[in-house]
Every structure is written in structure tokens, then in C-alpha cells.
Amino acid sequence: MVTGRATVSQKIKGAYNREKPSRFSEPFRPVVFWNITYRCNLRCIHCYISASPEGLPGELDRGYTMRIADQLIDLNPPLVTLTGGEPMVRKDFWDIVGRLRDGGLRVAVSTNGTLINRESAVRLARLGISYVGISLDSPLPAIHNMFRGSGDAFKRAVDGVRNSIEAGLDVGLRMTITALNISEAPDLVELARDMGVKRIAYYLLDLTGRGRFAADIMPTGDQLRSFLDRLIEISTEYSGDPEIVLVRGNFMGIYVADKISRSREEFLSLLNMTSSQGDCGRKAVSIYPDGKVEPCQFIYWIDIGDLKLQTLKEILKPDNPNLRIFLEIYRHLRGSRCSKCPFKQICGGGSRGRALALTGDPWGDDPACIIDPDELSAKWKLRAIP
């Protein structure tokens, strides 16, 4: 958005920009995040699925899992991201990857990176994995290790990054933004550049899973604004290398659009670009380890289907009422700010998980929102965004 350049995203999605927004995914052909396990070799304090070494009951066996893989091949989504938990702890991880790739699907892996040694990195590359996203919650080892509950998580994650790059894989870093790491979060860019990483995705803390108990480490509005202002400077300074992506708060995209726009037309084109990326249930869905299909990894209280009872094609239909809610989420927002916001079709109300955790109402306001819709509407002479 800031520089008009992308690296890894453009390689996966094809060319897109403010004049030509992404059409990579569509409502009934969404990107699929497949959480293949509840188990993880770490125990992160902010994990959205409460993953742990012990896991949780209900995880599907190999037979069910392979049938889901075949359904994904039949659906032919633009991208399947294997995640967890930690996807590489699952014994049939390589079989799942192989089945999807043999079926012609583009596959990414979202991992904590600690299990990617040189051998597994080469194996991922030979299988044609499109992208590996590795979590790094701070450029400071002690902070990352604190989040991850392990004294050597940082070293092992960085080793995983280096092994992946050495094997020729496209690698990105993923960082969850909290009050505890936001001050040094922009410094992750320097670490990424030093390692040769071409993409960073900053996730604003979502309060689901174990994250429900982390409300006290949500960044303040002032912290978030200062962080975004610094990212704009960095993106400009380095001409978009690495590519920087903001996740779990489309209002951050609106904030950035306002900061960098020089005309009403430019502001509107950047809003269109923000909206085209989609959100929970809107161009993206998640399959949980028990076969339930959720609007995304961060919403667990409304199932849009169950693969033990239905097929993916049956679930991803216009007449599915639980899916329709998220395709038109702006119609269901009832918080005093979000329901009246002229940007609600762009933003979708931010995070429903934060709304539930902080207000008790999943359709209420997201208290993390940092924009003043009335001020922006007056500034850019807007009534509502079509």
C-alpha cells in the first residue's frame, strides 16, 4: 500500500496494486487455513487455538484427514495453508503435504520454525511449498522465548528461517503485536533484512484461545498509532523490502491509507485495496483439527460446517446461513461505533474475537480500533463507503 510493491505476496497472488486490487480469492473459493493439529511443541501465551504438547481431544485421524485433503483438491482453492498447533508435529504431516501437492494445490506452511532443520527444509522445497511463515514475536531473544514458553525458541526459530532460505524457500516472519513487544516490533525489519526474509506479517493480538486471558497486554491506541507511523517510514525508506503486511485489524489499513493519501481519489483506491484482501469468512475459512469449518482461525463460536457430516462444497454455498453472516458482516454489527461507521464494509468491524472478549458481545465494537470515522469522513468528504 505504501510503496506499491510486494514480494512474496505478488509471487503467490500475481500482480495487484491500488488500481488493480487482488482477486486471488473469492467468497466461494477462499484461501483455506487448515489447522491439522491441536498439538504443539511450545505453549505460547497468546495461542489462538490453545495448542500444547498434550493437544486436545477430537483431532481427526489419518483416514478423515486424507479425505479432507481430497476434498480440498476437488475444491481447488487458491492456497491451502497448513497450520496448527504446530503442523510439523503431526506424524502424517509429510503425507498430507504430498497429497495436496500431488493434487496440484498451492501449499504454504505456518510454523513456529523450531522443527525445520536442513533436511526438512530441503524436503519442503522439493515438494514445492509456496511459502513458509515462521513466528518470531520479537527481535529480542528473551522476549520471544517468554511468549513461546521455551528458553531456546528464538534460536531454533532463527535456525529454521536460515535453513528454509538456504533451501530456496520463500520465507516470511509473523509477529503478534502486544503491549509487551510493540516498542521493538519495527526492529524486526532489520533482522528480516539481515536474514534475507522478504515478508513480515504483523498480527494485532486477537483474544481467542489462550489469548482470551491476554487482554491486559493489548497495545494502547497511542502505541498502535506510533507503531504504524514508524512502519510507514520504514516501508518508504526501504522501498517495500521486506514487504510488510498488517493482519487482524482492517482499521489499521484505513489508518495507513489516511496517512499516505494525497487526494480523495487516492484514499478511496487504497480503501478498495484494503477491502479486496478479505477477512474471516470473506475470502478465507479455517478447518479446525476436529473437522469443524470456521470463518477463520480466530472465530471458534460459530461453525459454518462440519466435515464429518458435510463436504466443503456443500459448506461453501450462498445458502449457508452461518457463512452468509460473515460475507455480509457489516449488517450484523451492533456496537455503538461499528454499527454506524461509514467504513464498516471495508473493515468488517475489526476482530469479533476482541469484541467478544472485551465487551461480551461478538457483534459489538472492537475496542482496539484506532480511527475516528467522523473525522475521516469529514476530511475526505465521505458519507458511506459503497
Image: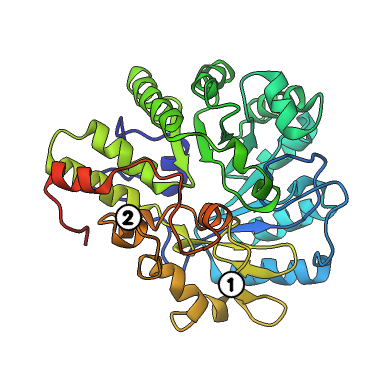
Question: Measured from the top left, where is residue 265 in percent x and y?
Answer: 13, 44
Mark 2 or mark 1, which is nearer to you?
A: 2
Kind of residue at badge 2: Ile
Front residue of this view, candidates 95 and 9: 9
Give the residue drawn at x 61%, y 34%: 169
Q: Amino acid at mark 1?
A: Asp
The answer to whether one can see residue 59 in this image is: yes
Name which quarter of the figure residue 216 lies in. top right
| Residue 14 x/y as whole percent | 39, 47
Q: Tell me the crowding category of disc 1: few under 14, some 14 to 19, or many 20 or more residues within 10 angstroms, Cα based.
A: few
Between discs 2 and 1, the one toward the N terminus? 1
Of the 4 image quadrants, the one containing the N terminus is top left
Residue 357 vs 157, above or below: the answer is below
Kindly identify which residue carries mark 1: 74
Query: In the rendering, which numbered label is found on residue 247?
Result: none
Question: On the image, numbered disc 2 is attached to which residue?
Answer: 346
Using residue 132 as the reference point, say whether residue 362 is left or right of it.
left
Quick check: 67 left or right of 347?
A: right
Residue at position x 52%, y 16% in the image: 190
Q: Name the residue nearer the viewer: 259 or 215.
A: 215
